[in-house]
Image (spheres, rainbow, N blue to C red):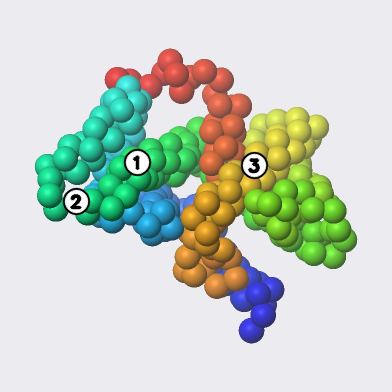
Amino acid sequence: MNDTKQRVLTTLCLAPIIVALFYLLPARWFFVLLALVACLSIYELITMSGIGERYLVLFLAILGFVPLYTQSIHIFLMWLLFSPVIFLITQFLQGENIKKDNVNLNIMRGVSTLLLSEIFIVLPLFYLYLLKDVNSIFPLLLILALWASDIAAYFLGKTFGKKLLVPRISPKKTYVGLLGAIIGPMIIMALSSEFMGTGIVESTIIGAFIGVLGQIGDIFESAGKRVCDVKDSSSLLPGHGGMLDRLDSLIFTAPFLYHYFTGIKFLTGIRV
């Protein structure tokens, strides 16, 4: 089965389940779902990075969800500072058990992976949870917009794309594909303007930003894969790669959409 058929079949099987979960789950269970997604994504990132302390990094990164569940952003920021310290202490306590070859590289790789997990996986998923609080349908609309972005980018880029966008990072991305990635969410958000309480023009502009930011997140993750010398974060989703490959478009879009509708409430309205 070729890549396109695998991609379509996986989408047809999983899309109805994802739509149902995003629409029907109450906020608490939606948070649990996102935590599970984070676990899978972080483990994929850890595996890609090749660090030895896999479960320690996974544990420390997932602990960041605890203060976020209580919406204690200041505690989460403190955890961003101190979780690498805890990782370093565990490495020092191992003493002679640490392999002498490339020990400094392995330690810094572990710290970098931990921070990347907390900032670019845990935090964007938390924003998706916050969107559920703003309006229960917003996370679903965002996911549908990103799906439309991926589909339009894939088929337009494959059919008409010739000039490559960032060949050293993502050799299949084209300028035509980028255009499709922007048009797709513009259509979805324009059709959803009534649900968002915005005008069609405003919704279309929001869609354009989602398309651009989604592609930036995708390129960002692709750069990480090139550094780790892997094609996909895993083979969990046939035709799509891993969970992290599906999550990358949320890195910047979820924070953008939340802050667009709430202004600076995230910085001033969260209890500490």
Would you say 117 lies left or right of 64 here?
right
Q: CA distance from mark 3 to mark 2?
A: 37 Å
Q: Amino acid at mark 2?
A: Ile
Report the front residue among 15 and 80: 80
Q: Amino acid at mark 3?
A: Ile
Q: CA distance from mark 1 to mark 3?
A: 25 Å
Q: CA distance from mark 1 to mark 2?
A: 14 Å
Q: Is disc 3 placed on a helix, strand or loop?
A: helix
Where residue 211 appears, as percent x and y from the top left, is 70, 43
Mark 3 or mark 2, which is nearer to you?
2
Query: Height in image: 186 above or below 239?
Result: above
Residue found at the far bottom of this picture? 1
Q: Residue at x 84, y 58 (%)?
A: 161
- For mark 2, does the 10 Å Cα neighbourhood hold few (<14), some (14 to 19), or many (20 or more) residues? some
- For mark 3, does the 10 Å Cα neighbourhood hold few (<14), some (14 to 19), or many (20 or more) residues? some
Numbered label attached to residue 216: 3
Numbered label attached to residue 98: 2
Instruction: Indicate which disc, 1 or 3, sits on the residue closer to the N terminus.
Output: 1
